[in-house]
Amino acid sequence: MIHQGFRALSTPDADEALEWAIARCPSVMVGEHPLPLRDGRLLCAALLEDDRTASIPFVTVTARALPDDLAAARESHHHGVFAKPVQPGQIFDHIRELVQ
């Protein structure tokens, strides 16, 4: 991601990602679905419920690519949903649009 002009931080699970988001308020978050302890939908919902993180765009990358799974993610206020396999350039282009 650094080569694309982004800095990235990886966390071992969604709970730590939530704590990090509250402490740092990143420009955008990218998460996988499912995640350990809390899936991407629950992480996105937790971000939206907290005034400190509600404005952080959340992009999901998922192996669950059935139409119902993708629709559910989009309905959960995710700012982008990408089904694996996905080209990294697609995600980077989308993130650029979100942070402009």
Image: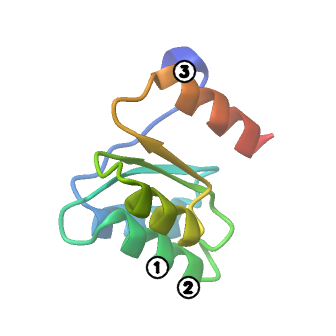
For image coordinates 37% across by 63% down, the residue present is: 40
Q: Which mark is residue 89?
A: 3
Residue at label 1?
A: 46
Type of amino acid at the residue the image marks with label 3 = Gly
Residue at the disc numbered 2: 49
Picture residue at 19% right of the left edge, 71% below the top: 37
Gap in angstroms between the C-alphas marked 2 and 3 = 30 Å
Disc 2 residue type (three-letter): Glu
Mark 3 is surrounded, within 10 Å at the Cα level, by few (under 14), some (14 to 19) or many (20 or more) other residues, namely few
Q: Secondary structure at mark 3?
A: helix
Along the polypeptide, which appears first: circle 2 or circle 3? Answer: 2
Would you call the spot at circle 1 few (<14 residues within 10 Å), some (14-19), or many (20 or more)?
A: some
Q: Residue at x 38, y 75 (%)?
A: 42
| Label 1 residue SS | helix
Instruction: Decide which of 81, 39 is in the foreground and name it.
Output: 81
Q: In the visual, does 43 lie left or right of 95?
A: left
Question: What's the distance in space between the residues labelled 1 and 3, CA to CA?
Answer: 28 Å
The quadrant holding residue 100 is top right
Relative to 1, is 29 above or below? below
Identity of the residue furthest to the right in this view: 100
Please tell me in which quadrant of the rendered image residue 61 appears: top left
Please tell me which residue lies in front, 18 or 70. Answer: 70
Can residue 88 be seen here? The reply is yes
Residue 27 is situated, as x and y percent measured from the top left of the image, at 64, 50
Q: Is residue 85 left or right of residue 73?
A: left
Mark 1 touches mark 2? (CB < 8 Å)? yes
Q: Viewed as shown, does residue 36 lie left or right of 83?
A: left
Quick check: 45 left or right of 97?
left
Number of other residues with Cα within 10 Å of mark 2, as a class: few under 14, some 14 to 19, many 20 or more: few
Look at the image and tell me whether residue 6 can be seen: no
Q: Percent x, y for residue 75?
A: 57, 70
User: Helix, strand or loop at disc 2?
Assistant: helix
